[in-house]
Every structure is written in structure tokens, then in C-alpha cells.
């Protein structure tokens, strides 16, 4: 029997290694920019074409390479960062494995031009799929100029699984932000298809944060400075009132290297307990400085998972430091009032009758929008400012809509149809014949109604999401989706990655009734929103749409409109904790019951459930 074990060629081994190190164009940028920073570069220029598919060019003014070093750098396990295994425990550079350039050269066409400051001529090197095609002297500036062309051209399966240009560019921007944040002493420029997305000058850490994330973040940051024998932590944390439900800005760096550390994240979150609502996340930008011998970065090829020798003590130090920073922010000095000759302040008397003016009612009033004072910055078309003063007529409209909804779901000529259609056969259904015109709200979230078969429970927010979603989809299909112009357009400030996502969504958002126009940088003006969304924060709604796409990925073209309609419906629906009147609950139920699928939200979440009377009896 012949031998079956063979030694893989270097080109195949490099392609296998590339599967771990190079996952997408963003991985190439990460590795090359880290090499530029290790080479003491003070200016790094990134040029992209087609989100890195066609070209990734990294130009730096670092120390450069000699002719021999330039050729040897593309061999596996060749590095200038370490010499022995002991060096792994004293790392102060970003790279050390010696796999990145070999992996990049294995799956792309590479051209390198480099020169050292003490050399008259530089070197031009051309490599195609690990094969060196040419190397010759070249007149070039000091530093290195990498051109990575046609990534994954020889690995069709990997190239096929790349996402759209907008998604890949968004990933590149996120990786760029991590690199640029912590290296605030380096100038960066990022250009895509000839358009400059970033031009970052040297500055402080705070200046770099605001340059990347927006100037509006400057007023939300609280400084933190911890100095102990184990660890030094410097940076900024966000104020509790600026916590986010999604897409929070959370960055941790150790010895200038980005890291993901769920354990330390919990330390930060423990300091925010009782300060932010459940489900929200604070912003933070934290830089850890520790002895390199106390951490291990050689765990994963991406080098973002870091093992600390003293995790528990650092956890306690970090949690205490964040609490102390929040305490300084919340500290209010006491005021000593001088009561001598102070005027008497009349106290409120609950028994004094207060005369209030009569209230005019808008017939187009949306009873489910948030009860808040309209901002003077948001005014809508004057033809929507009609009024009427007949409360009996308004109540009659509520009753009529409820009656129509019940008749549509339970027609007189079909008395046997007594249940709502459901998506699953084993799903509890609502017996319409048992429906009572009595509703009770629980915890500002659920609507309860007694029925002969038990207790009916409706999630009011999900019910309104279902109503609005079906309304928007119906208008889109009939081409009757109308816009509502904002008299004073609202300005939203986006990051570069959010701007990319918005450009991709813009055609579909216009079909939904949105109108947005670009301003300078990544600022956009919201000129119009879908009609019927009075009182909704337009800028927050657009931000929520962008966040949902960034977190969930860009849906396929045929589902983008449904995705947008669902996101807008969630943004405009009555929020949890909103108290409803009996009339508002009546109209909500009437609108819900006339829908063909009222039991579930568009994403499959339960809206209506019934607790049988037998189950209730067992509780007693």
C-alpha cells in the first residue's frame, strides 16, 4: 500500500491560513494598517475601489523595507516583531505571527513599493497568488505602498460569499474606526471610489472620538482615570441618559490593541445598574495599560481575544472606577438658603378650583402617538390643522370603527366563524363571540378583557405594530403612500458607516414617503416623513432604521420595503408604559380585529393570547 500522507505546497497552506486571518476586505485593511503603525508611520492613507473588491491601497510613511526584507516579508512565519517564544510575553507591537502578508498574497494580486530613509532607491515587488512575478529597483517615497487587487480572485467560493459593496464598506469603516480611535497620534485618510470619507488629524483621544463619532458626542462623555499597580485605565464613559437600546459605542483597548472582553464589559454594566433602563447600553471608550507579561494575545488569529492574568482584581478596579466617575458627574453641591426677610411663597391648595379653557379636538388626531409637547422645530402642513369641538361625534367614530371591525371578522351571515385566523394550528385563538367591550390596561403594556372562555391578553405595542405595518404595506402596494413635509427640516449626524447604509436604503425609503437630502460630511436633512406620523421624532426614526439594517444586515431587495415598513411601524407604535384611555383601547382593538392576521406581528411575535378559565381555576 502506497503512502497517503503528503506535505501540502506552500501556496495551498497559505490559502488555508488565509481562511482564518483574511475573512473579508476589512481584514486586509486591519493587518496592513497595523503593520504601518508598527513601522512608526505618522500618516496612513487608505484608498478603496468597490469596497475593496477591486483595490485596497495602503500608503504609509513608516521606516520602509530593504530589497531583501520586502521579498522575505511574504513568506510564512517571517516577522520582525519577535525572535524567540519568550518574546510573546513582552509584545508591544500589533503583529507578531508572520502570517498576514503571506495570507494576503495567497488570495490576491499584490504590488508593493517600498524604500528605507537611508536608501537612494526603493523596491517594486509584484506577487500573484503567492508567486513572485517580478522584483526591481524603483523610485518611490520613504515608507511602504501596498496595492491589493482582486481579493479572492483565485478562491471563487470565498469571493461568492462576500456581501454587497455597502455591507463590506460598512465593515471596513468599523474596522477603520477601531484602528483610528486608539492611534490618535497618527493622521488617517480614507477614500472610497474617489470620495474622501475621513480625514483625521493628530489630536487628543477625545478629539479623535468626536472626529469619528460626531461632535454631538463631546457633551456626553465623562472622563475616567484609574492608576493602580495592576492596571491603568484612561478614557471616557457615556452619561446614563445617553445610553442606547442598540448600536452603542463600546470600545476597549489594551496596550493600544482593540479587544473584546465580555467580563470587563459586565464590570462597566454593573456600575450603571439602577441608572439606565433594562435593555439599554452605555457608551464607553476605555484604554487599558498593563504589563505585557500579564496578558496573552496569542489566543485567536484576529488577536481580539485577550487573556488577563489578574482578571478578578481588574474587574473590581474597573467597576469601582466607573462608579466613581459617575458619582462625580451626579454630585450636586448643597445650597444654604438665607431665609432672613425671605418673601412668603404661597403653597399649592388642592381644594382650590382651577378653571381650564375648553379643548378643541383634531379629527385627524392619532390617539396612539406619544403624549408630548410638539417641538417648535417640527411643523407640518397647515391643511392638517383642522379642529372640531364635538366630543360625542369623536366617540361615535370610535364606536363605529370598533363595530365595523367586529362585523368584518364575525359577519352576521356566517355565525360559525368565531375565531381569528392563526399562523399555527396550536396557537391560542380569540373567540370573537365572547369579546366584551370592557378593557383594562396592565402595567401600561397589556390590555386585558374578560371572555366566556377565559381571560384575553393583548400586547398593545405589538398590536399597534401589526396595524401600522399592514397599513403601510397596503399603501405601498396601491401606490398611495404619501409624504408629510416638515416645515423646518431636522438634521441628523451619522457616522461614515451609517451614511453608507443610508445611501443604500434611500430609494426604498423614498417609496415609503421619506425625503432626505445630504448636507456636508455625513450630515443629512430629513425633509419629509410618511404621512400620519405626527409627533414622532423623525431623526430618531431614521436612526432606528439605519441601526436595524446595520445590526441585522441588508435584506434582499424584495424584502427591503417590508423591512422598512416594520421598522417604521415599531418606531411609530405606542411605546411600552403608555397609559391608554378606554376610547383609545376601543379603537386599537377595532383596528386590530379587522386585519387578516391579527394574532402575530410581521416577525412572528404573539399579539393575542387567551388564558382558559380552566387554567385560571387551577390557580385557586
Image (cartoon, rainbow, N blue to C red):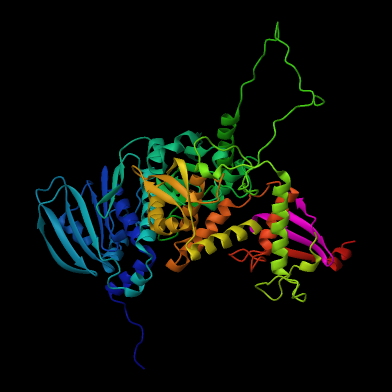
* Relative image position of residue 72 (x, y in whole percent): 22, 61
* Relative image position of residue 576 (x, y in whole percent): 66, 50
Q: Is residue 440 magenta?
A: yes
Q: Is residue 444 magenta?
A: yes
Residue 316 visible, this angle = yes
* Relative image position of residue 41 (x, y in whole percent): 26, 45
Residue located farthest toward the right when viewing the structure as drawn: 620
Question: What are the residue bounds of the magenta stretch?
Answer: 437-462
- For the point 44% across and 56% down, which residue is it? 509
Of 82 and 321, the residue lying toward us = 321
Does 341 sit above or below residue 350? above
Residue located farthest toward the top when viewing the structure as drawn: 341
Residue 459 visible, this angle = no
Of 399 and 518, the residue lying toward us = 399
* Relative image position of residue 260 (x, y in whole percent): 48, 52
- For the point 35% across and 43% down, which residue is it? 519
Say how many tags the image has. Answer: 0
Q: Where the C terminus falls, by quadrant?
A: bottom right
Amino acid at each position: 500500500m502506497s503512502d497517503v500522507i503528503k506535505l501540502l505546497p506552500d501556496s495551498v497552506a497559505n490559502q488555508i491560513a488565509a481562511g482564518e486571518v483574511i475573512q473579508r476586505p476589512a481584514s486586509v485593511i486591519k493587518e496592513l494598517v497595523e503593520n504601518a503603525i508598527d513601522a512608526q508611520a505618522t500618516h496612513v492613507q487608505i484608498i478603496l475601489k468597490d469596497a475593496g473588491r477591486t483595490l485596497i491601497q495602503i500608503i504609509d510613511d513608516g521606516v520602509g523595507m530593504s530589497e531583501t526584507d520586502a521579498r522575505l516579508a511574504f513568506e510564512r512565519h517571517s516577522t520582525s516583531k519577535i525572535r524567540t517564544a519568550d518574546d510573546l510575553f513582552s509584545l508591544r507591537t500589533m503583529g507578531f505571527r508572520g502570517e498576514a502578508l503571506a495570507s494576503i498574497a495567497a488570495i490576491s494580486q499584490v504590488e508593493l513599493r517600498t524604500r528605507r530613509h537611508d536608501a537612494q532607491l526603493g523596491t517594486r515587488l509584484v506577487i500573484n497568488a503567492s508567486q513572485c512575478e517580478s522584483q526591481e529597483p524603483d523610485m518611490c517615497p520613504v515608507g511602504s505602498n501596498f496595492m491589493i487587487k482582486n481579493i479572492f480572485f483565485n478562491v471563487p467560493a470565498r469571493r461568492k460569499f462576500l456581501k454587497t459593496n455597502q455591507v463590506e464598506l460598512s465593515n471596513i469603516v468599523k474596522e477603520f474606526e477601531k484602528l483610528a480611535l486608539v492611534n490618535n497620534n497618527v493622521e488617517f485618510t480614507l477614500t472610497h471610489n474617489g470620495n474622501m470619507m475621513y480625514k483625521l488629524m493628530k489630536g487628543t483621544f477625545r478629539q479623535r472620538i468626536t472626529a469619528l463619532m460626531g461632535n454631538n458626542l463631546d457633551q456626553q462623555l465623562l472622563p475616567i482615570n484609574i492608576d493602580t499597580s495592576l492596571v491603568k485605565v484612561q478614557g471616557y464613559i457615556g452619561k446614563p441618559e445617553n445610553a442606547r437600546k442598540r448600536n452603542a459605542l463600546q470600545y476597549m483597548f489594551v496596550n493600544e490593541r482593540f479587544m473584546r472582553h465580555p467580563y470587563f464589559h459586565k464590570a462597566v454594566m454593573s456600575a450603571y445598574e439602577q441608572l439606565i433602563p433594562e435593555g439599554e447600553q452605555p457608551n464607553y471608550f476605555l484604554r487599558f495599560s498593563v504589563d505585557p507579561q500579564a496578558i496573552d494575545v496569542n489566543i485567536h488569529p484576529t488577536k481580539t481575544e485577550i487573556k488577563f492574568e489578574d482578571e478578578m482584581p481588574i474587574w473590581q478596579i474597573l467597576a469601582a472606577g466607573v462608579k466613581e466617575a459617575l458619582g462625580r458627574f451626579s454630585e450636586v453641591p448643597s445650597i444654604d438658603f438665607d431665609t432672613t426677610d425671605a418673601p412668603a411663597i404661597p403653597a399649592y391648595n388642592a381644594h382650590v378650583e382651577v378653571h381650564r379653557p375648553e379643548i378643541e379636538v383634531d379629527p385627524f388626531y392619532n390617539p396612539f402617538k406619544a403624549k408630548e409637547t410638539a417641538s417648535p422645530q417640527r411643523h407640518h402642513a397647515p391643511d392638517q390643522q383642522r379642529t372640531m369641538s364635538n366630543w360625542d361625534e369623536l366617540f361615535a367614530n370610535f364606536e363605529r370603527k370598533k363595530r365595523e371591525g367586529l362585523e368584518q371578522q364575525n359577519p352576521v351571515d356566517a355565525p360559525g366563524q368565531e375565531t381569528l385566523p392563526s399562523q399555527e394550528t396550536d396557537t391560542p385563538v380569540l373567540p370573537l363571540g365572547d369579546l366584551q367591550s370592557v378593557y383594562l390596561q396592565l402595567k401600561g403594556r397589556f390590555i386585558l378583557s374578560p371572555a366566556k372562555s377565559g381571560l384575553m391578553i393583548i400586547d398593545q405595542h405589538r398590536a399597534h405594530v401589526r396595524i401600522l405595518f399592514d397599513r403601510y404595506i397596503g399603501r405601498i402596494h396601491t401606490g398611495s403612500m404619501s409624504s408629510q413635509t416638515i416645515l423646518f427640516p431636522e438634521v441628523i449626524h451619522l457616522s461614515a458607516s451609517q451614511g453608507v447604509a443610508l445611501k443604500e436604503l434611500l430609494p426604498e425609503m423614498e417609496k415609503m414617503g421619506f425625503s432626505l437630502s445630504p448636507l456636508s460630511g455625513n450630515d443629512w436633512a430629513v425633509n419629509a416623513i410618511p404621512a400620519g406620523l405626527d409627533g414622532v421624532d423623525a431623526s430618531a426614526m431614521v436612526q432606528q432604521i439605519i441601526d436595524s439594517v446595520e445590526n441585522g444586515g441588508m435584506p434582499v431587495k424584495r424584502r427591503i420595503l417590508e423591512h422598512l415598513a416594520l421598522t417604521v411601524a415599531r418606531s411609530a407604535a405606542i411605546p411600552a408604559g403608555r397609559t391608554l384611555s378606554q376610547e383609545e383601547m376601543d379603537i386599537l382593538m377595532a383596528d386590530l380585529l379587522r386585519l387578516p392576521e391579527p394574532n402575530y406581528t410581521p416577525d412572528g411575535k404573539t399579539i393575542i393570547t387567551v388564558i382558559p378559565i380552566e387554567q385560571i381555576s387551577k390557580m385557586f
